[in-house]
Amino acid sequence: MSENVSSSSKRTNFLGLIKRIYRSVIGWGWKYSLWPIHFVTGCCCPEFMQVAGPRYDMERFGMLPMAGARQADVMVIIGVLTRKMAKRVKMLWEQMPEPKFSVAIGACPIGKGPFYDSYSVVRADEIIPIDVYIPGCPPRPETMLQGFMLLQKKVQKKLMEGI
Amino acid sequence: MYTLNEIIGSLTKFIGNLWQFIFQMCMSLAPVLFIPGLTFILLFVTVVIWFERKYLAHAMLRMGPVYAGRVFGWLQCIADFLKILTKEIIVPSDADKTLYYLAPILLPIVDGLAIAFIPVAPDWVIFRGFGYGLPLFLAIVSLGPLCPLIAGWAANNKYTVIGSLRAAYMCIAAEIPLLLSAAGIAILAGSFDLVDIVEAQSKMWFIIPGFLGALVFFIGILAEAERTPFDISVAEQEIVFGWRTEYSGILFMLTMMAEYISLLAWELLFITLFLGGYKGPVIFGSPFISNIAWVLIKLGILTAIIILLRTVFPRFRLDQAIKIGWRYLIPLAIANIYIAIIIKLFFPFVV
Amino acid sequence: MKEEVEKELVEAIKSKFPDVIEEAEVLRSKRISVTVKVDKILEVARFIRDELGFDYPISAGAVDYIKEKQFQVIYYLLSSKKKVVLMLRVNIPRDRPIAPSLTPVWSAMDFHERETWEMFGITFKGHPNLTRLLLPEDWEGGYPLRKDFKLSSKEGS
Amino acid sequence: MSEEPSKRVMRISWGPQHPMSGQIRILVDTDGERVLNIIPDLGFTHRAIEKILENRNVVQGVVPVERMVMVDTANNALAYVRAVEELLGIEPPKRAQYIRVIICEVCRILSHLYGFGLGAESGGGYPAVFLWSTADREPFLDLMERITGTRWSYSFFVPGGVYRDFPDKIKDKFLKTLSYFEKRLETYRRAWFENKIFEARAKNVGVLKPEDAIRLGAAGPSLRSSGVSLDVRKNEPYEAYDEIDFKVVTLPEGDSYARLFARYLEMVESVKIIRQAIENMPSGPYRKSVSPFKRLPKGEAYARVEAARGELGVHIISDGGFKPYRVKITSPTLRNLYVLSQLPKISDILLADLPVIMYSFDPWYLDADR
């Protein structure tokens, strides 16, 4: 009886080990291959461009902006999100294949920022679930890079645990 | 009555024969599995994508991938591969499902099959094609541009349709000069067999008598393999990803791989036709290894040049590219044929 | 003395349309303001474009004078030769906000009149395509730039 | 928006998610590769800045106005601040005017770098130039950070002057950066404007004749590259521009190449302006204090400024309260987008040309949407 239990637990352990190895490998791959969608919603885009540019270079982390929604993994909401744009953001979010993650950059998608009393601005988390918030108006490039590193950690952890 | 000895003897003979058979089988499979075959293709794709990203990044004063794999981001492609394997595949609801799946699977297979005709060493060819390696290669590779057309139509998206139509225009404009300049080489070598063509270049590489043909062929390669400045069918700034727009997950990866596999196939043909194929002085001891090494060296240099072009050239417009194809490349290729005939008739000592 | 060109322009308008012009003045150097009656605005606009050379349309907007119960539509025009800005104003009653469109005169007023229409609810008669420009397609909140439109609370919803 | 015109015509929705669209949706009617009609669908970044400005006092108002164009914040803020100053009847001190000129011209360089970088990216996918242009913005951003405290949104201009003094210590660094930048400009010309493929793609594409440019109301470099010399800095000199020697860039061609090249030439002029402003900057006070808790006098003021994308106007109407009664912003991009929408009617456009033409106008949709 006790032997049976131990052997079955061994087997599950072995399976579990393989599963763990598989998941950690996949998680590692995801960590270094987060492709943000090539999509700009608002006015933080020049700073985002500087992050993609030579001094800060987002591609060091394997982040390569993708032209289409079908190939992207990360929805990056860059700057103010208006009602009209929010519809499109939701549409694109639904077009992206699973698993997918999202980042909100700037004060406006987090809490409407300087347009707090505008009738046409909405918060990002009213539209799609947000994984990482990066505050600032616009955020400094270092802040953005730290946000992306946080996202990397979160993605790796999520995939290690299994989605 | 057989004695035990005889039985054992015949058995050993049989086993020996079997072993030899298996060994030969393995040896004949080796090209498929290793050098111009699967392993080589996959390695080429991984290395070239990594190299291209790194090279482009440095041209833009950036670093490119750094952190995946610690040193120069050399594991970047593996990470991308692992990620894209686990991505969801989305098929648009209005798409023609069979064709939608078929096109990206067919495309790398077609280009991969064509590589089978390329000799990497005098007797190291997967399939010699009954002495008609060159026309067979061209015939099989010409199936390739059909796939974008299928894919673009099947995905049922306006951008994919535009992209696939552009791909079709481009391949017509590029393939005729390619065929013509290859014909010039066949005349020079007096054979359609790729091994014979390589052997005919022992005195002189065909790039010297067939310089015009080489130029046309090189530009044709850029157009066929959708490289800058002719990457019109996947022009990101105009039509998102062209005919690839709707593909996600592993299907997208297959289309990306297919681009590089077709580049590899055309480059190998270019090396075989113009750059003396596996010919070269023996440098690594055994002639076999040095043959393969020469192919790899030539391939590396050619690939580096093609990637370099991407950093210095913007993209042509469709009508300009087609104009180049019809107005300049085809006359040049025809001139090349005449030059080849003249050389064959009056200067036979050259080849 | 410094504003000779501007004064000349104002005089030209005034003498041409003595009974149509409600008000015409030089605000400061390079700024003229002309207020016109609604029904003759097209004629005045053609005169301003052809005779006075205000050929460069800058923009159009409106102001909601809720106490006076009227809208003031303002067209911003520039003379590319004389480099003077003219503000062509027209007052229309708030309860019947209809004004003739100036797109036949300056076709570039297209977008600006569309914007004014959706922001104030001023209908421009004769406009080729009076549809939404900036607001969402399914907007049903009224006319945002009118003074009786209140912005949401300070907290942000 | 409206239904598809006919079977032969394909209507493509371009944006708001498209690698080259930005925050706009453009409906393009195409017959094969030929563009028949361009219908811009704006408003994806409409934040109601004009309405918000009615709810802010004049010092707070600078913040939303700056967010209209993030790469060109100083010129936007300047237009608003100048309108307020005209309303209050104050003139900033001479030193403040010079500081304003310097910061505005740096912003013009930042913006034009963006504009012609994107033009390079759109003119056949040449990302190298685009990324070089982001790299060359960094030294200027560092200088701006040293002067104003932030990289992009300075909120540095206040009614009555500037917020802080210009640190004289960094004059040398400024001049060094300028000479470095002049070298880089030479590189851009050789790498990009003399590139044969780019010339083939952008020359004679989307030609805008001078009379059309005036009639349709093109703004800024897009207007001046059609041969029309309209520049607020010259026609109606504000701040210290009347004491500075510079020339208005005009090009006769009016095609996409000229529009992008005009931006390049304006950067060359901007470098000269900054040099002169730094050398001639007088000493003295940099701000006249203006209380934000003061009623605005009743009246109106319409201030015009030559922003990077063209003439930008802010018309403030006050009824004597703390806050402006109505603020009307006349933005250049909205006018340029109208020109873009009318362009298929006056010249032949192919679908592949559309990104080049769009980005030759250097549109900033947040500016058009407000």
Image (tube, coloured by chain):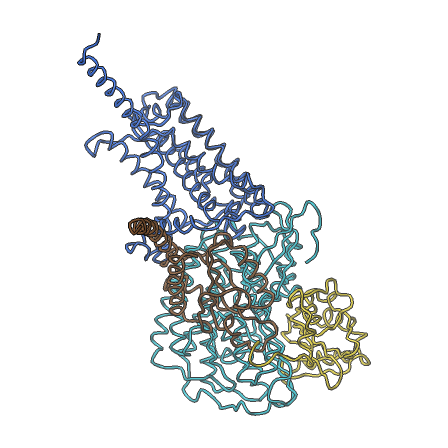
Chain colours: A brown, B blue, C yellow, D cyan
Which quadrant holds the N terminus of chain B? top left
User: Which residue is at the front of the view, C45 or A59?
Assistant: A59
Furthest residue toward left = B5
Looking at the image, the residue that sits furthest to the top is B1
Residue at 28% from the left image edge and 35% from the top image edge:
B294
Q: Residue A128, image x and y in percent?
A: 53, 64
Report the front residue among B57 and C16: B57
Q: Relative to residue B245, is residue D141 drawn left or right?
A: left
Q: Quadrant of the C terminus of chain B?
A: top left
- Is residue B204 toward the left or the right of residue B323 in the image? left
- In the rendering, at what x and y percent does residue D181 appear? 39, 66
Residue D244, percent from left and from top? 47, 77
Above or below A147: residue B290: above
Where, by quadrant of the figure, is residue B71 drawn? Answer: bottom left
Residue toward you, D8 or B36:
B36
Question: From the viewer's perspective, is residue D305 above or below residue B269?
Answer: below
**Rendered location of residue B320, percent (x, y):** 53, 44
**Apparent side of residue B293 relative to residue D105 in the rendered image (left or right):** left
Residue B330 seen: no
